[in-house]
Amino acid sequence: MIEREKKACRILTATYRKAELPEHQGNPLIEALPPFCVGKERLLTFGKYPAFNKRELDLSPSARMLAISRLADYLEPLACHETVITKTFLMIYAG
């Protein structure tokens, strides 16, 4: 997808791909969705990890304390995430 900035709104340009199942073919809402995948393949793209550099271990204690705020940007994928993602995709595809 291509991202463009316009008036502080993030606008995504849809990338359409041909649906695999005949009942979804020609449905632009389904064809604009990312590919449906399950298992480890999905979880690999789901995690979110903050930047870290080993040199930061040598920073002052106050700077290291400030770096802790990066943990708000951390998400470790768990098995329950896979269940929620799969069920959500299935509901979207079902309409």
Image: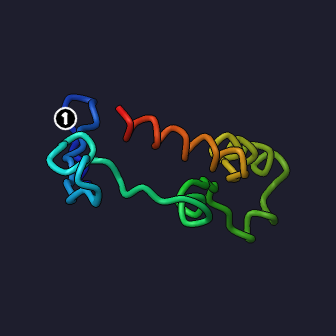
Question: Could you say where residue 77 lies in the image, as x and y percent from the top left?
Answer: 68, 53
Query: Image quarter for residue 10?
Result: top left
Q: Furthest residue to the bottom?
A: 54
Relative to 18, residue 87 above or below:
above
Relative to 2, residue 56 above or below:
below
Please tell me whether mark 1 sits on a helix, a strand or a loop: strand
Left or right of residue 85: residue 12: left
Q: Nearer the viewer, residue 39 or 60?
A: 39
Total labels: the figure holds: 1
Quarter of the rendering occupied by the C terminus = top left
**Would you call the spot at circle 1 few (<14 residues within 10 Å), some (14-19), or many (20 or more)?**
few
Left or right of residue 40: residue 71: right
Q: Furthest residue to the right?
A: 61
Relative to 1, residue 83 above or below:
above
> What kind of residue is marked 1?
Lys
Question: Could you say where residue 76 lies in the image, as x and y percent from the top left?
Answer: 70, 52
Q: How is the image coloured?
A: rainbow
Left or right of residue 21: residue 60: right
Question: Could you say where residue 82 lies in the image, as x and y percent from the top left?
Answer: 63, 50
Residue at 60%, 58% in the rendered image: 43
Quarter of the rendering occupied by the N terminus = bottom left
Q: Furthest residue to the left?
A: 26
The residue wearing badge 1 is: 6
Residue at 19%, 46% in the rendered image: 13
Residue at 70%, 41% in the rendered image: 69
Query: Image quarter for residue 30?
Result: top left
Question: Could you say where residue 62 lies in the image, as x and y percent from the top left?
Answer: 80, 45
